[in-house]
Amino acid sequence: MTLRILAIVLAVLAASTLGAVDVCGQDMLTVIYDDGRQPDEIPVWQLEKDSEELFLRANDVAKIFKATQFWNASTRKVILGIHKSRFTITVDTRVVVIDGDPIMLRSDIRYESGFVMIPMEFVLDLVPPYTLRALTWDPSARTLSVDKVGYNVAGLTFATTDDRSTATIELTEPLIHHVDSNTPGLVRLKIYGGRVDPAKFLVREAHGLFDGVRAEQTDRDAYVYFDIKRYTSRVVVEQDETPPRIRVVLEKGDLPEIPEPDFAGKKQVEVVDRRAVEHRRLRIRKIVIDPGHGGKDDGKIGVTGVLEKDVNLEVAKKTREALRRSVGVEVVLTREDDRLLSLTRRTEIANELEADLFISIHCNSWFSPETGGFEAYFLSPAKTEWDRAVAMAENAADDYLRPASDAGSDIDFILWDIVQNEYINESSHLAELIQIAMNDRLGLRDRGVKQAGFTVLQGARMPAVLIETGFLSNPEEERLLADPEFQAKVADGIVEAVKKFKARYE
Ligand SMILES: [Zn+2]
């Protein structure tokens, strides 16, 4: 090849990629599929000088996930329809709205030379839980592998003896569950991070005390519903680590000789979650309440200027009084006044006091004033979440120093230590109890219990949850959050949940 031809080839190559993009580096990567598609070669860019984050064009992201794509030039939004979910991203923001729920990326979505550029984090961490695909990035080989992961809630079998019936759910990996029976005749099992094929879990015929089974897949979790015979007296849920499985055991009570007419409508069965109970007995004597932010860190700022740090402190104080009064436990706040505390110090306090529970109190915020509701969080054990947590941990100090007006969620700030994993069952249970208590009291939208792969709390050796009491960006909720009566309701909800938690574990 002559130099002249080479020069032309190079010029064509440059023009066909992104001649005018303001980049620190451009590279190609190979995408390898497991579904028979030929590998793709796609360009990636490093757009930020001080960040390793790689960016892909929205078109290529759509190709990888076989997504439908819609670009609204006036609002600068891209909507990607991936699997059963809808991902909305907005240029020059870190926001991704997934089926109506906002999540933050570490970097902004960019627009360069006519292309919407999406950070690799979106592809690797954000999307996979909503698909049945796992993505693996090998930086040295510059390959991105897209693999089927299949269902981890894999199989269902039944066994029945005279007075008990057992449904065994086979898992391909250990998963956290939560069980409740608030509706008579129905047992609901929530499997965090579960992926289930509802068609495979549809059982219409009875198996002993089971009248039928159905399953539901939400964005991140699997639910299995068991219809049970009305003379079931007890539900025992047991979990094995190896092989990973969950057993739902129904025990028969005495069948009344003359059934009461409204028997089925009133009866609530006793639910025993054996793993959580037998795993460990907890004594709930001392609770540390952590009012988020403080001092020069205001936290979120409401539309009329209500400060998150103030709401958090008021709610924490009211919770302390209510817990002392009606549960009789010792309660310590991480801060009593308007002062800045490091994240490490917050958990150190809990550890030094050998607290039995840690509850961190925050308020939420979002760009749209309509968004609202209450959320409880516990830690996620999923590997992808951990990877994310580790990456975030590296930036933790910087995150903390970011201006408080940054709309970043609290999750960015909260870095849970790996040892938290040990208390995952208890933490998820406490979060569920708090969410239920708040739904009964606050009249806010139920945003559900969430798991998040954050970190902090170096070595918080106790069940720990974080609550987002409401949205300061929502004018109505901002008014409520500043209202002592509403704050008292939040405190009351925490008390109710702690009472139930205490009764269960002691
Ligand atoms: Zn906060």
Image (cartoon, rainbow, N blue to C red):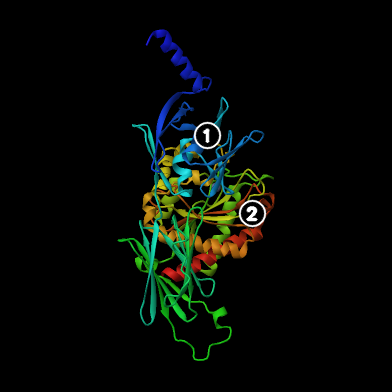
Residue type highlighted by circle 2: Leu
Sooner in the amino-acid sequence: mark 1 or mark 2: 1
> Closer to the camera, 58 or 313?
58
Task: State the residue in front, 19 or 176.
Answer: 19
**Residue 123: x, y in percent?**
46, 40
Q: Position of residue 439 (x, y in %)?
A: 59, 62
Label 2: how many residues lie within 10 Å, few (<14), some (14-19) or many (20+)? many
Q: Quadrant of the C terminus?
A: bottom left
Residue 59's disc is 1
Which residue in the rendered view is the most extreme toward the bottom? 257
Q: Residue at x 37, y 34 (%)?
A: 143
According to the image, label 2 marks what residue? 481
**Residue 91: % across, % down:** 59, 34
Q: Is residue 342 visible?
A: no
Residue 42 — which label? Answer: none
Q: Residue drawn 47% across and 60% down?
A: 198
Q: Amino acid at mark 1?
A: Asn
Q: Can the viewer see residue 371?
A: yes
Q: Position of residue 298 (x, y in %)?
A: 58, 43
Q: Is mark 1 within 8 Å of ligand 1?
A: no
Q: Quadrant of the N terminus?
A: top left
Number of disc labels: 2
Callout 2 secondary element: helix
Name the outermost residue toward the left: 242
**229 above or below 148?**
below
